[in-house]
Image: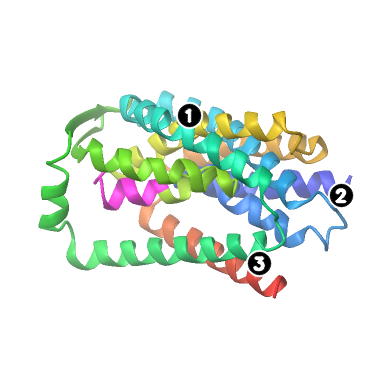
Amino acid sequence: MVLILYYFLASLISSTLGTLIGAGGSAILGPLLLITETSMGTSIGAKNIIGTSLACVVANSVSGSYRYLKIGTVDIKSGLIFSVIGIPFSILAALALIEIDTTNFKIMFGVTLILITIFMIYQSMKNEIIGESNSIIKLNNKFFSENREIVTKDSQIYKYTFSMGVAAFYNIFLGFVATFFGIGGGIIRTPLLIYISRFPVKIATATSVFSLLFTSLAGTIVYWWQGFYDLNLFFPAATGALFGAQIGAQVSRFLNGQWIIRILALVLLSMGLLLIIQNT
């Protein structure tokens, strides 16, 4: 009973924070479960944790997407294009993880989280210091430039221009890395949409959650088809993800996006360091 409650609360908190920035929740849930696996007296195994965490991303994304679609902050066209591009690489990543030896997986995961954190903090600071650079403006007017105008349910209007070619390129990378580590991809996609493609923060967050639904589902199907899941973990964690996504989507309407990213970056840095220390 204690373990079920722990899985539920861990997923609820992870999902709430993750949905706030379009991360899907498992950017926190996956490493947290890997770190606490021994202390909580479980022996699920890295591959089962990744497969189950990714399934929780699907649950989180269904719930979060529903809420964001009702609010009206999803760029549906872009989200579907990102999904179509990312799905083949998501499947490839799942097949790759199934085949490899996971002896050093936690160290690889820890290093990846630290690199993501550095990227997030650097881009956040750079954005505040120099604002919108001319090079980014020029880049988003090339390579299949797209113009968007999103009108939300409360009549807020967002207008932006971005390069679909550039966005397509980094979604190829995201489709692989996100599924390989079971983090869904939003933790990387959201900052890229904000700082490279110049999406408004709330549109980037909602669109990222929406796109995660399809790429994460593709990876989850492969993992579960090969037997890499744990139902004792999935049911309480998926329930927490459903509730957390609703809370996160609602709270995102009132919080400053930059502070959310900084808080999450610190959490990821701590987990990355713990994963490395724990396995060296």
The image shows residue 209 at horizontal and vertical percentages of 46, 36
Spatial CA distance of label 3 from label 1 is 31 Å
Secondary structure mostly seen in magenta is helix
Asked if residue 241 lies in the magenta stretch, the reply is no
Could you say which is closer to the camera, residue 40 or residue 94? 94
From this viewpoint, is residue 254 visible?
no
Residue at horizontal 69 percent and vertical 50 percent from the top:
10
- Sequence-wise, the earlier of marks 3 and 1 is 1
The image shows residue 95 at horizontal and vertical percentages of 61, 39
The image shows residue 128 at horizontal and vertical percentages of 25, 64
Establish if 126 lies above or below 87.
below
Spatial CA distance of label 1 from label 2 is 30 Å
Residue pointed to by mark 1: 65
- Give the class, few, some or many, for how many residues have Cα within 10 Å of label 1's Cα (few <14, many ≥20): many
Q: Is mark 1 on a helix, strand or loop?
A: helix
In this image, 93 relative to 102: left or right? left
Spatial CA distance of label 2 from label 3 is 23 Å
User: What label does residue 2 carry, if any?
Assistant: 2
Residues rendered magenta in the picture: 189-199
In this image, 7 relative to 216: left or right? right
Q: Residue 135's image quarter?
A: bottom left
Asked if residue 194 lies in the magenta stretch, the reply is yes
Residue pointed to by mark 3: 275
> Which coloring applies here?
rainbow
